[in-house]
Amino acid sequence: MPAAPAKGRGSFITFEGIDGSGKSTQARLLADALTAQGHDVVLTREPGGSPGAEEIRALVLQGNPDRWSPETEILLFTAARRDHLEKRVWPALDAGKVVISDRFADSTRLYQGVSRGDLRDLVDQLHALMIGTEPDLTFVIDMDPAEGLARAKGRRTAEERFEDFGETLQRRMREGFLQIAAAHPERCIVIDGNRPAESVAAEVLAQARSRLPEPALGPGAAR
Ligand code: ADP
Ligand code: TYD
């Protein structure tokens, strides 16, 4: 059974969306804005976010697209997430912090649950068994896949196992993210990513502030 923190302590915010939709940019801008407003913020990402999970990140994102079977890949992403939660996310939530993660379980539900076969049940079962935690708030950055891919390709790295899958996969992922958002309106907000980054950030911040508890007043907190 997952050892999740006591409910009600800290806030867990995730960013989801296709490659190049602006998740990393928006996660950073939100972290900066909330920090300036006095929140104690931890900015992190998946796959990765803890030393062990970063090692698994290299295994899953680099190399041949056929390197892992779909089932093995689900286990690797789940193992990385479990380590990230144990070492970084749960302790921060227990300490009352705001945790902002660039991707989380919705990415596994789609990339591993849909892209290489109908494995969503397996993903959901492993999530229930080993993860258990859901975000308090998920921003789904919606974006035209061609535009997202062009942006993502603009910053070529070795981490291209998934980006190599191309625009058809990105279209399916976009639809999938919108379906998850529609199924979970209690935590998901769809944000139009086809705008200048500052406009997107302003809407994200307004939504986050309306949902977050006020920060505890601390020295240096700009309010
Ligand atoms: P993701 O994390 O979703 O892959 P990034 O935040 O890394 O997306 O953004 C991908 C690329 O697009 C980066 O080069 C970034 O500077 C650029 N970018 C991010 N947001 C915008 C935006 N709103 N308009 C134009 N370019 C953007
Ligand atoms: P990321 O570094 O967020 O890529 P990007 O900035 O291009 O959006 O994530 C790397 C890749 O990992 C991305 O193509 C999606 C994939 N991924 C999964 O397949 N499953 C997962 O559970 C996660 C978290 C990411």
Image: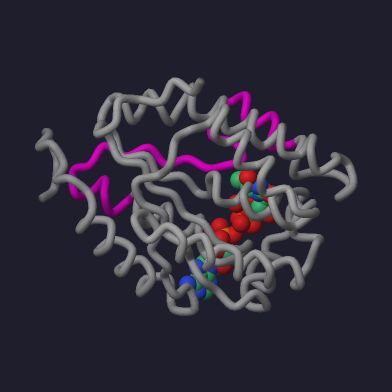
Asked if residue 196 lies left or right of residue 129, the reply is left
Residue 49 covered by magenta stretch:
yes
Is 111 above or below relative to 182?
Answer: above
- Residue at (35% x, 66% y) in the render: 201
Q: Nearer the viewer, residue 134 or 191?
A: 134
Q: Position of residue 44 (x, y in %)?
A: 47, 40
**Does the rendering let one see residue 28?**
yes
Is 123 above or below relative to 161?
Answer: above
Q: Position of residue 154 (x, y in %)?
A: 68, 67
Q: Nearer the viewer, residue 138 or 220?
A: 138
Q: Position of residue 185 (x, y in %)?
A: 37, 61
**Does the rendering let one see residue 50?**
no
Residue 217 covered by magenta stretch:
no
Instruction: Classify residue 127 by image quadrant.
Output: top right
- Residue at (65% x, 42% y) in the render: 123
Q: Position of residue 195 (x, y in %)?
A: 44, 79
Instruction: Classify residue 209 by image quadrant.
Output: bottom left
Q: Which residues are magenta?
A: 32-58
